Amino acid sequence: MNYIFQDWPNNKENTKGKIIAFLFRIACFCSKNSIMKILFFPYLLFYKYFFEWILGLEIPYQTKIGRGLKVYHGYALVINRNSVLGENVTLRHSTTIGNSSALSQCPVIGNNVDIGSNVVIIGNITIGNNVLIGAGSVVIKDVPSNVMVAGNPAVIKKYLNP
């Protein structure tokens, strides 16, 4: 049960974020193995269509996301299933995280990363730990830990204390 509620402490006063994270974690739990997928197929179907058609966001239950996920607003949020997000990642609306082409790999995002709205993170790149990504940024190259990046393409604007 702790698994399903692991994101709630980071979403204390963010009801929508709690609901999004809660439904995501249930879908992840229901897809742990083939038997669970068969038994909970109706929920997984509900999850996919509710998220994509009603909420207008795509967070596939196959996506690897560490504990402490925080989602603000959620609208137009698209994450490729092969992306990897670390612990305590904050996502905002109109953000895309995924591959740059059908044959390319997806980003790996570290822990304690705060991603602004309207951000695009694409390609086979790594985002370090303790990173702030400014709104409207396009991240197409690796980002080291403990920095703030912004712009199109994103560049380091400030070094942060570790």
Image (cartoon, rainbow, N blue to C red):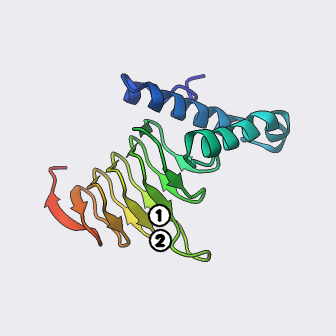
Residue 123: percent from left, percent from top: 47, 71
Query: On the rendered structure, is 155 left or right of 1?
Result: left
Query: Whole-Å distance between the Cαs marked 2 and 1?
Result: 6 Å
Secondary structure type for disc 1: loop
Residue drawn at (35%, 73%), measured in percent from left and top? 141
Q: Quadrant of residue 104?
A: bottom right
Amino acid at pointer 2: Gly
- Which residue is the site of mark 1? 107
Lateral position of residue 130 relative to residue 20, left or right: left
Residue found 43% across the figure and 54% down from its top: 95
Label 1: how many residues lie within 10 Å, few (<14), some (14-19) or many (20+)?
A: many
Q: What percent of the width, then of the height, locates residue 12?
A: 37, 23
Instruction: Give the x, y percent position of residue 160.
Output: 16, 53
Secondary element at image label 2: loop
Identify which amino acid the numbered label 1 is placed on.
Answer: Pro
Instruction: Write down the residue under mark 2.
Output: 123
Residue 76 in view of the camera: yes
* Above or below, comparing residue 42 to residue 116 in the picture: above
Crowding at label 2, few (<14), some or many (≥20) Cα neighbours within 10 Å? many
Q: Splitting the image into 4 quarters, where does residue 138 fall?
A: bottom left
Q: Are marks 2 and 1 in contact (CB under 8 Å)?
A: yes
Which mark sits nearer the N-terminus, 2 or 1? Answer: 1
Numbered circle sitting on residue 43: none
Q: Residue at x 67, y 37 (%)?
A: 27
Decide which of 90, 48 is in the foreground and name it.
48
